[in-house]
Amino acid sequence: MADALVEAGVAEPVQVEVRRLVGSLAAAVPLAPTQDAPALVWDERYGWRTATSRRHSIRKDTGSAPEGDCIRYLGSSRTPESADLLEALADRRRGFRQPKR
């Protein structure tokens, strides 16, 4: 997915940050400066979401889904097709403040 985001010109071609959380993995993809969010995060538990910080895009695991004014959960599933994720990222009206259960 990171390669598809880079190819579409919405992500930076840098190494993806991967972090092991309690019982799951999360990965952060830094987005291009032209994007509304600094990064996209994929979390095994919740799927794709925007992040509020480029430097600290994967927050400390608190046992609940990250929420906030600038966080949008994207895609129709935890593992959407790259085209679906790109469409959701481009359309600011799409996404949810909380992950789908």
Image (spheres, helix red, strand yellow):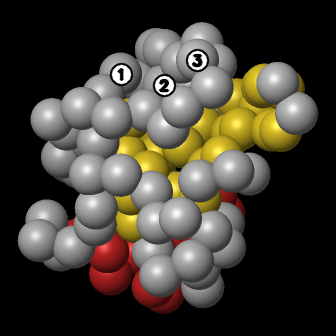
Name which residue lies at 35% across and 22% down.
Answer: 53
**In which quarter of the view is residue 52 placed?**
top left
Q: Residues within 10 Å of mark 3 (few under 14, many from 20)?
A: few
Q: Is residue 95 left or right of residue 58?
A: left
Quick one: label 1 or label 3, which is nearer the N terminus? 1
Residue type for callout 3: Thr
Residue 73 falls left or right of residue 41: left
Look at the picture and state if 76 lies above or below 79: below
Q: Are marks 1 and 2 in contact (CB under 8 Å)?
A: yes
Give the image quarter of residue 26: top right
Give the amino acid type for the residue marked by disc 2 in the picture. Answer: Ser
- Label 3: state its secondary structure: loop
Residue carrying label 2: 57
The residue under label 1 is 53
Question: Helix or strand or loop: what does disc 2 sit on?
Answer: loop
Q: Give the spatial CA distance, label 1 vs label 2.
A: 5 Å
Residue 77 placement (x, y as % from top left): 57, 77
Q: Is 40 placed above or below 79 here?
A: above
Q: How many marks?
A: 3
Residue at 82% x, 24% y is: 22
- Quarter of the figure that contains the N terminus: bottom right
Residue 94 is situated, as x and y percent measured from the top left of the image, at: 21, 73
Label 1–label 3 contact, CB within 8 A: no
Q: Which residue is disc 3 drawn over?
A: 62
